[in-house]
Image (cartoon, rainbow, N blue to C red):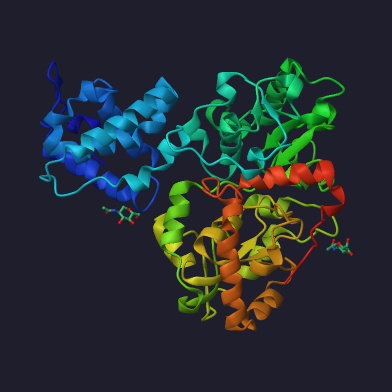
Amino acid sequence: MLSLSFLAVVYGTQGLDCSEDQGTWDYVKYLDEVSAVNPLPREGREMLYNLYKSWGSPRSPRQLQPQNLAKCASGVASVLLHVLPYVDRDDGEAAALELWHSAKDVARHADGSEGWSVNFTLHNAAPKLLGLDPSVDAEICTQPGHPWFFVYTTKPEYASPLLTCAAGMEGSETLLHRWLLRSRCRTESPDDADFFYVPFYSFCFQNLHMKAGSEAEELDKHNIELVKSLEHFDVYRRRQHIFHFAHEFWDFPSWEAHVGRSKIFAIEANPLVDARRYRPYRHCTTCFDSWKDAVVPGHTDLWAMQRLREQSRPIEERRYRFCFHGALRHELYEKTHAGGPFNVSAAETRRQIRAMAGEPDASIGPHITPVLDYYKRVGDCQFCLVPKGVGFTNGRLFEAFFSGCIPVILSDAMIVPFFSFVPWPEFSLKVPMGDVAGAVSRLRSMPSATLKRMQESLHANACWFDYYSNDPTCSPYQGLLRVLQMQRSTPWEIRPAPLHWA
Ligand SMILES: *[C@@H]1O[C@H](CO)[C@@H](O)[C@H](O)[C@H]1NC(C)=O
Ligand SMILES: *[C@@H]1O[C@H](CO)[C@@H](O)[C@H](O)[C@H]1NC(C)=O
């Protein structure tokens, strides 16, 4: 990598111009190309941020004088787009949005002499998240009698920085909160509220602010203090309060004592329990209550969703019958136990998967990088194995919807979202995690007409898992509202999912 001293910087009283040496611009172009196939590593982004700061951190088009930038417009626009999460973190969301407009403006002035141009579709999560093109509201919120949500304002560091926290499976904690803030289901009057939403991006918060080792105690303290601060959390209304846990651990170890009566929105319905007290680690299979709690779909980044969709091939053209690429060993795969009947370990399932490597119709192995190559591979697989990891739920499941790769769930205690109204058995298999060979012979015997039908259903139902869905009748938001409605008015329709289906 080039060091920063290489980056000769020119930002005089005339504003930024294009007189940086060619090496700088070549390097920016190189990083931009990398970012099309793999999220930029932190060093790359930090280097671009240092370059940006050396320009005096211009925010608006006027500061930038885009007409002076015709010869380096793609380079400048690319830098501005890549530093958006840092600007959001350091200067706030309004500054980030302004900068996004500047990038657009600068790019328009390109004179073509650079020989490349920045591709805005690779960066379109930021404007969506920043509110320029927000997710559509759920249909339920447009209907009479819809539920009303009061959204608490918690400490700023609990609910930001937006662009950093809206990433990965745990990004649901950010997306759902931001959607609620804009929804017609929101009320600012606690007296009208049916539900009280408590935003705390606890997964993101611990990554940004805590040292490894003491997270459990620290998060417990933050959560207890947070609950104490909630103005409407009284004996009557605590049942209407919603707490969102987006991680395999519910990041509030003493949740039961403090919010046990409240609604839990969780990605993992059988969370790992405080590692300090229980070794080897234990899953709690009685924490989740389907009559009051809801399973939230894991979040897939827009960048990943788009790349996965581009690589998705028709089922009959796919080369591999089944695939798995990921970690085959991990200390926690051996050490996490759920107790009977869930006593097969993740390590055992992954051992059995590894034993299938080398089969002519399988692609099995470690992680593939750059990630675009991984997406190409899963786009070339008919079935994707989704084995238990540290948690029963994992992000692989949600990727499958966008890659069109039929998921084969090998994670016995996984509780999938929305089982009561999304036809899971039409587009997936859930088979005993202790018998990978049995699962494989099952899916090898499936006729191609069935595969085609399953893939069509997978595509048709992907919107339930798409946090950027443009369909008001089908999105994670609409799904969660339906769950709440069923719990309130038609609880007999809440169907517990069977352990397996195939
Ligand atoms: C930008 O990227 C998208 C997604 O990869 C691609 O479909 C499109 O053709 C690209 N546009 C240009 C101008 O290269
Ligand atoms: C796993 O659980 C089942 C049912 O609870 C039990 O019959 C079986 O003996 C257990 N197996 C092991 C290896 O613990």
Quadrant containing the C terminus is bottom right
User: Could you tell me which residue is drawn at 62 percent across and 20 percent down?
Assistant: 153
User: In the image, 374: left or right of 159?
Assistant: left
Q: Residue 288: in sight, yes or no?
A: no
Q: Is residue 381 above or below residue 395?
A: below
Could you tell me residue 268's position as x and y percent? 70, 46
Locate ligand 1 by image quadrant: bottom left
User: Could you tell me which residue is drawn at 86 percent across and 23 percent down?
Assistant: 236
Q: Is residue 407 above or below residue 125?
A: below
User: Could you tell me which residue is drawn at 40 percent across and 46 percent down?
Assistant: 39
Quadrant containing the N terminus is top left
User: Could you tell me which residue is drawn at 79 percent across and 62 percent down?
Assistant: 499
Q: Residue 118: in sight, yes or no?
A: yes
Residue 146 figure quarter: top right
Residue 433 figure quarter: bottom right
Q: Is residue 114 above or below residue 132?
A: below
User: In the image, 2: left or right of 251?
Assistant: left
- Front-lying residue, 4 or 72: 72
User: In the image, 450: left or right of 163?
Assistant: right
Could you tell me residue 157's position as x and y percent? 56, 22
Could you tell me residue 403's position as x and y percent? 50, 62
- Front-lying residue, 3 or 86: 86
Could you tell me residue 373's position as x and y percent? 40, 61
Count of number-bearing discs: 0
